[in-house]
Image: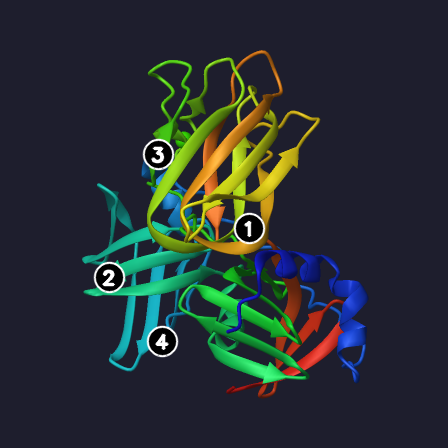
Amino acid sequence: MKKLSACLLAALLFLAACTSEESAPEPPPASTYKPPVTEPYVSPALPEEWGDDAQNLLSVPWTVVSSGAAGALTFDGERVRWELSSPNGSAEVEGVPAFEDGVMTVDGQEFRWKTLAAYCLLTTGGETWRLTRADSVDEARRAFRLVNGTWSGSGMTLSFEDQIASLSLGDRSIQGGWTLSNDGTLKISSSAEGFNLAKGAKVKADSIETLDFPPELAFDGDFSTRYSSAYNDPVTVTADLGKTKTIGCAVLYFETAYSSEFKIEYKNAQNQWVEAAHVKRNSQSGVDQPVTVPFKNAVEAREIRFVGLKRGTDWGHSFYELELYENVPGTAEMKVYAEGEEMVVLFEGLTYRLTKGS
Ligand SMILES: [Ca+2]
């Protein structure tokens, strides 16, 4: 998988619609696809005493997408059904579930799980399976065939490896976590969970408001804790990532005390601080409106610093989190469905027919 620089990727994704026809001399035909009409999935009511944990696990059906295996975890409002078929054999467990201490027991078998944005890691019978949401088991089974391995054709390559999907089209590419909904919408997001390179960095600041707001609170992955500077300009927050990483973008989640002008700098191989981005903003932005800062070029660096040049309010510079990513977060959305042995992809108004294998 070729990785483009962050800016190039951002620009290409943004300009996708205008450039795709020029870069592909013989484009695939325009789409005439109509998504299948399916009944919306109605999640069963769960007993209140089961709590949020059960809600996360049983309010949608899940299908197994671990490679080499097929299966599903479903709940009909009363009974849980776990079906699995893998090279090591098959299993079927069904019964009324019981929950205790984060463990679900069905017919004597224990299930432990961790639900992420689009996935569930389910451990049972001594093995862990990767599951993805599906709004009906039939759809899930059909989708299961599509979300494994590498598919290519018509200048497009689409591959699924572990929890990461990669789309490559001409000289554009995007890589990240993915979701597949029951109408066949496949969404790839390049800011996948767990890819924030700044989390847990060693940090220091030349200014803090009080000891309640030290800079490490902007690197702890917790959106309820924050850094805040004293009420002055400029301020500097320096993060040491522990080792050199490729960084193409920062994402800041400001508090009410936002910065109206700031720079992100990195330390180059000659130990000089170099500007990666310089941002001037007019409007306030809270924790629910992250500020994405693409770097001019992706950089290789171990140390990164935030330089708050101008405060947006009379208070200091304050943010809940400063995240760093290799790529500019972005999404690519397409329709996919199976037709015989082919995967048909509808993307930017064009139809691509892919076959399995690279
Ligand atoms: Ca925080």
Element type at mark 2: strand
Residue 69 circle label: 4
- Check disc 3 and report the residue beneath it: 203
In which quadrant of the rendered view does residue 200 lie? top left
Q: Which label lies toward us, 4 or 1? A: 4
Q: Amino acid at mark 3?
A: Val
The residue at 42%/63% (across/down) is 163
Q: Secondary structure at mark 4?
A: loop
Q: Earlier in the sequence, mark 3 or mark 2?
A: 2
Q: Position of residue 230 (x, y in %)?
A: 46, 15
Q: Nearer the viewer, mark 3 or mark 1?
A: 3
Task: Give the class, few, some or many, for how many residues have Cα within 10 Å of label 1's Cα (few <14, many ≥20).
Answer: few
What residue do we see at 63% from left, 36% from top? 279
First-in-chain label (2 vs 4): 4
Labelled pair 3, 1 in contact (Cβ < 8 Å): no
Q: Is residue 184 above or below residue 318?
A: below
Closer mark to the observer between disc 3 and disc 4: 3
Disc 1 to disc 2, C-alpha distance: 26 Å
Q: Amino acid at mark 1?
A: Val
Task: Judge depth for marks 1 and 2 and give the one in front.
Answer: 2
Q: Please state if 240 lies on the left or on the right of 299 as rendered.
A: left
- Which of 25 and 85 lies nearest the eye of the viewer? 25
Mark 2 to mark 4 CA distance (whole Å): 14 Å
Q: Residues within 10 Å of mark 3 (few under 14, many from 20)?
A: many
Q: Amino acid at mark 4?
A: Ala
Q: Residues within 10 Å of mark 4 (few under 14, many from 20)?
A: some
Q: For the residue marked with disc 2, what is the amino acid? A: Thr
Q: Which residue is mark 2?
A: 124
